[in-house]
Image (spheres, rainbow, N blue to C red):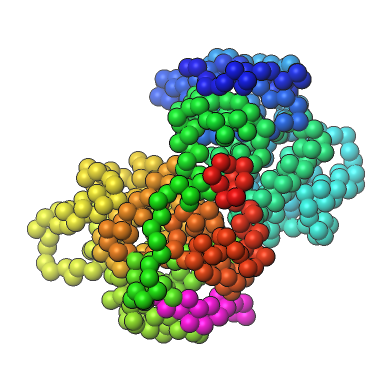
Amino acid sequence: MTVVQSASRLEKSPAAPLLAVRDLTVGYRVRRRFEPVVHEVSFELPPGEVLALVGESGSGKTTTAHAILGLLPENGSVSGGGITFRGQELTELSPKGWRDIRGRAVSLIPQDPGSSLDPVRRVGHQVEDVLLLHTGLDAEARRRRVYELFDLVGFTEVERRYRQYPHELSGGMRQRVLIAAAVAAEPDLIIADEPTSALDATVQRQVLDLIDDIRRRTGTGVVLVTHDLGVAADRSDRIGVMRQGRLVEFGPTKEVVAQPQHEYTRHLLNSVPARAGAILDRKPAPAPARETIIEVSGLVKRYGDAAAVDDITFRVGRGETFSIVGESGSGKSTTARVLTGLTTATSGRVELLGTDITGLSARAFRPLRREVQIVYQNPFSSFDPRFDVYDVVDEPLRSFQPRRGPRRRKRPNEERVVAALEAAALPADFVNRHPRELSGGQRQRVAIARALILEPTVLVLDEPISALDVSVAAQILELLRTLQAERDLTYLFISHDLAVVRAISDRVAVMRQGRIVEQGTVHEVFTNPVEDYTVRLLEAIAGRRSLPGGLS
């Protein structure tokens, strides 16, 4: 397959490549058959540059990165092509050869610090492991070097951090530990595999700034694996776009984002929330006189002495999308739990459809539960693993239908379940499938169908697209907009991503440390933010200025 690139994109860098991938084909042996998943991929990376490999789940970008690192699983192998690093062929290395090069000359920043760090060892000792393997430093020199590395990645109180365990650190701090380990032996090449996908926007920006700073200081080359074209546009010199195991477009970043030549690249660019807010034909905000569906006054929720939510006030009208945005720990999800009756308020007043729910017991709240349904960030974890799709979507109906003798039909609510699935843009035959057989976007549609089946007035959407690929996320946002228009639904949308909020909301409240620090219409907050914290959130949006049509 021919990679789409202009004549200017074919020009070679005058510098000899640090990394060269030639016609790389990689596959996995499954049930005695070899299944290729990466097909004849070729690219080069000069020293000191950043190459972003961009694509959605299943595109082959992570498999390509793991092949470069020699970290394919036992059933995976390179079946064609080659990978040279500083002129050395990596596909021919022995296990000992890989041990000599991996961590010293080529290193990895993995996606998930939670699973990459040993929970029962101090983080300083884990960074020391790299120095023990690849340097001749004695124990005291290794400790001093870790202190230097922790200072390099922006830690204060480096001796204290050295002694801490992973659970004592935030997600952003754990990612900094992994970066310290990756640069400990001063490698020439770093593979960063979705290094910020689980982080808040401002923390993501700090981590990417850190990687950029280290690259500039040391001349290290970086292969940045990401599903986010906004991140790639901001942080790379070159972009390779992958789809179904093939490199469909490759070239200098500015050229690719300004004049994408492949249809799939254009599709990804148009799906980035930083652009989608401007591209989508947004509806006008509802008139202030519309019926109030949610009214929150002076809400406080304490856990012990700590206030997770501290004296917040807002109202939401019928048919409106009201978003609460903030970083982890800001109190936005706790607010959602109070509104859905999953936890009780410490003080204040919360009215839902004219009923004060502040002091209601779970039993007293039950009649209102039909009117307010929730869609979670990770739908799979909210599904009973024994259930097929029919049972998942039917579950709310069963809970509100009293049993009167034995069932006459195995699936008494099948028509309503099918109608809910079709409203969520899923075919009727999905009733027989199991959630484990579905993609992430399909699972989220099943979760939306389950929320719709009781015909609620309010949907609480708690980070409903943060775990999805960018184009799938855009599809879910468009589905939510369509359903709202058809059913006059009221949305309370919880997110840490202001670009997504801009694409779907009428009004927005910005939360920090349990308080609402700013609220207003989307236009007001995005064009004339009052608080410095809101400005920082806006500045952290990936692709804000580097993508055409972004939030400039």
- Residue 98 position by quadrant: top right
Secondary structure predominantly adopted by residues drawn in magenta: strand
Image coords of residue 509 (percent x, y): 52, 68
Left or right for 455, reference 323? left
On screen, residue 18 above or below 322:
above
Left or right for 502, reference 235? left
Left or right for 270, reference 195? left
Image coords of residue 53 (percent x, y): 58, 32
Magenta segment:
294-314
Left or right for 476, reference 538? left
On screen, residue 244 above or below 226:
above
Q: Which residue lies furthest to the left in this view?
A: 408
Residue at the spot x=52%, y=30% of the render? 260
Viewer-nearest residue: 258 or 32: 258
Image coords of residue 132 (percent x, y): 81, 38
On screen, residue 320 above or below 476:
below
Q: Is residue 65 visible?
A: no
Viewer-nearest residue: 278 or 410: 278
Q: For residue 303: magenta?
A: yes
Residue at the spot x=82%, y=60% of the render? 157
